[in-house]
Amino acid sequence: MFSNSRYNIKVILFTILWIIIGSASVVLLVAAVRKKDEKICKGIDINISGVSNNFFIDQHDVKKIIAEHAGKNAVGKNIEGFDLRSMETALRKDVWIKDAELYFDNNEVLRVKVEEREPVARIFTISGNTFYIDSSNMKLPLSEKFSARLPVFTGFPTDVIILSRGDSNLLNDIKNISTLIQADPFLMAMIDQVDITGQNNFEMIPKIGNQVIVFGDAMNAIEKFNKLKLFYKKVMTKMGWNLYSSINLQYKNQVVAKIKGRDDVSADSLRTIQMMDIIAANAEKMSQDSLQAFVTEKEKNTDASMIQQSLQREELGDNSNTSEEPKPQERLNLPVVKPFTKPIAKPIIKKDIKPVQKAAVKTIIKKPVDKEAVEKPKAVMPKKVNK
């Protein structure tokens, strides 16, 4: 019985002890919090991160947002007067702030950590409006503080805020291509702007030379840029910056370049075909009428000379069909460079038309026939009789 009473006394004592310890802890905690609330803000430290060389929001803008919630004289104000959560929400509402975090350290200094949105591309719409996009494809307005040096994309199809699925994918392709261009100093120095075609493909305008770089869609962008860099370093530096009118990167493991003036060669070839059709028709007409064979040697030599010159210009062109993918050349380690021309049809000459040669033509001239001489018999003269 005595043992049970002793046990109950010990339990009661332990319970009372833990109650006293808990109460003391609560009192000390409340006192610490109250003491902290009575402290004043001794300073504000602002750290802006998330950018490499662009600063579209500065410390003055952050302090302005803090002052709107904590008052103009934030330094020297009681810490209990700061609503840190509402200030974080206000900072995040700024279009150039991606995230914000505020807290007081042990020295009563307000620490403000701001992550700024960094633009990765500047885009012009077909209507002429312009905006930036960041790494999360968020549209950003232009800033009066700073103009970013970024790849420029023109011809974006819409100005609406809520984009369709296709336009969102196009915006993502722009971000990926622009990121690759910025990561390479050579491409950043070479590419002047990127045009968006009606099929949502890309054509690039270089800063040096007058050619157009046909990039196609954003698939295999790294491989395409590697081919372009190799082409510029190995070919353009030797052949000249203005030799080609277009550089096509859409073919696998190949670069298809179009030389300036090939359209003129195609036009000459078409004129040659028309000229040969006319000559074939004339030859057929001359075979029916022998009098047409008397063509002067000078005229024949002129036609032959014109055809020969046109054929020589045609031989300079490439008669390959560009609708099919060019075949790679195994002997070259470089991407294949192939002139890009329109297919030229070969002239069709009829086999049944025989050329008329001057030496083989004979002219038969017949004397006119007197009809009266044929109808009337000739008078017979009497023979003389010897007596």
Image (tube, rainbow, N blue to C red):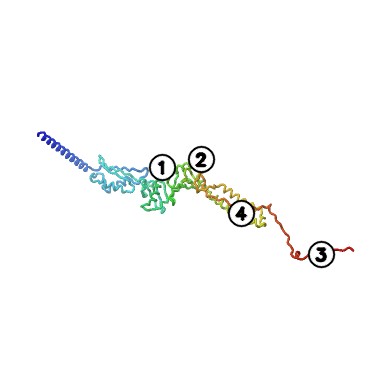
Q: Which residue is mark 4?
A: 280
Q: Is 338 positioned to the left or the right of 86 in the image? A: right
Q: Which marked residue is nearer to the observer: mark 3 or mark 2?
A: 3
The crowd level at tag 1 (other Cα within 10 Å; few <14, some 14-19, many 20+) is: few
Q: Which residue is mark 3?
A: 380
**Upstream in sequence: badge 2 or badge 1:** 1
* Contact between labelled residues 4 and 1, with CB atoms less than 8 Å apart: no
**Upstream in sequence: badge 1 or badge 4:** 1
Distance, label 2 to label 1, CA atoms, is: 31 Å
Q: Which type of secondary structure does the marked residue at label 4 adopt?
A: helix
Q: Which residue is mark 2?
A: 330
Q: Amino acid at mark 4?
A: Ala
Image location (x, y in percent) of residue 252: 47, 44
Q: Is residue 25 visible?
A: yes
Q: Which residue is mark 1?
A: 183
Q: Is residue 253 or residue 93 the one in the foreground?
A: 253
Image location (x, y in percent) of residue 203: 45, 48
